[in-house]
Image: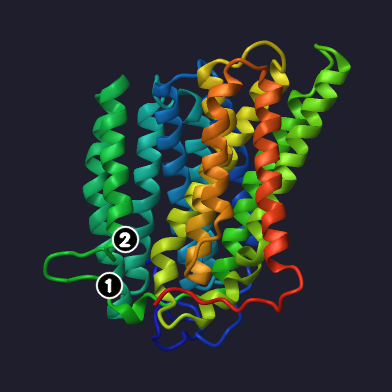
Amino acid sequence: MPFATPEQPPTGNGPPVRDPESPRRVTLLELFFDLVYVVALALISRGLVTHLSWERALQSLLILMAIWWTWAITTLVTDMYDPQRTEIKLLIAAVMFGALLMTTAIPHAFDGRGLVFAGTYVAIHLGRGLFLMPTVRRHPQTQRRAARIFTWFAVSAVPWLLGGGLAHGAARAWLWALALGIDYLGFRLAYPVPGLGVIPEHQRNVTAEHLSERYQQFFIIALGDAILVIGTMFSVGHSELEHVTAFAVAFVSTLLLWRIYVHKSGELLPQAISSAKQPGRFLLTAPYTHLLMVGGVVTTAAGFDLVLHQPSGRTPPAWAAVILGGPALFLGGRAAFEYEVFSRVSVSRPGGVLALLTIAPGVLFLPPLVAATGAMLVLVGVAVADYLRSRGRPPEAPSPPH
């Protein structure tokens, strides 16, 4: 299902697999599909700072991982199947409906709407398999691939539904963590199933142009969450100078996140995928590295919410963890992303994380606005280091790991 195939291109009445020779630019339907996730990320970042605690942080992480997985798997499906075909359009619309229903349940996923959230997640992934297996029955390899993936999602459905319907609180979190572990591990292992084996290597090819563009677009959606927080939380409830400063710090930080993402690795992702000896390696790693970066941006947006709401006073430890932890998580994911593209990690990435950890004890005695300013200055340092490293040098060719 979410792996490409070299089988013959379909006729107009054949299975809706992609023509290997056709262009795979992102369609307007895929962009329309992404609109659901603008709302989802906003609700996750907002929920993180509501009654902020370690328990709430874990819950937000699990929700983000579930929402992200519906997007990532659907993106890989559209890389393999022809989104211009009516049946695939209907499939994407159905997934969009399910993702929107999941999104409505986010604020109360660990309260009264757990079964709605979990049941919809299961219905999306099992429903996709039940739709695709008969649709591609004339492509035995493709059908067996869909069967492998369906089997893994059927296994994870048990803890998903038990957690949503019968468990509460910590028990629900642990069951959903188990379910997500099955989903993420199955993908990483290429969905091994007794009697069928794993998905063969030749069925894990990806399209550099399409896949890279989709991941770039979702990262922009995550930045959109930060912009939404900045715009909606700005007020004049405190001194105007304080709020204008907090507004500026949040905006500059968002701009820096974008700059650090696109610098070299973000720009060269399509070339890196197409030049790799095993393009399928990106298929098995890109969802995880981008999840880290998106999680970092969502957490940073939650930090903006805190700072814009209360820029003065002392910074509570939980607030410091969000304000500094968001950029640190982003830089960690960005380091892994750089390794995907260049087989190396710039010193500025771990250096930035170390700098954030170093200033963390001090910001506990300072206002949240100062903590956010410190995080911004660390990002400035990373961006400046990137510029100095590449200034006056010829463009670096991607060199993905073998």
Q: Is residue 262 above or below residue 311?
A: below
Instruction: Give the x, y percent position of residue 157.
Output: 26, 44
Q: Going 72% across and 61% down the picture, which residue do you hit?
A: 388
Q: Is residue 294 above or below residue 272?
A: above
For the point 31% across and 51% down, which residue is it? 183
Q: Say which quarter of the image contains residue 307.
A: top right
Task: Classify 10 Å Cα crowding around label 1: few (below 14), some (14-19), many (20 and above).
Answer: many
Q: Nearer the viewer, residue 361 or 9?
A: 361
Q: Secondary structure at mark 1?
A: loop
Q: Which mark is residue 199?
A: 1
In this orientation, does residue 40 appear? no
Location of residue 147 (image quadrant): bottom left
- How far apart in space, not on screen, are marks 1 and 2 (Cα)? 11 Å
Amino acid bearing label 1: Ile
Identity, as a three-letter code, of the amino acid under mark 2: Arg
* Residue 216 drawn above or below residue 140: above
* Residue depicted at 45% across the width and 19% down the height: 53
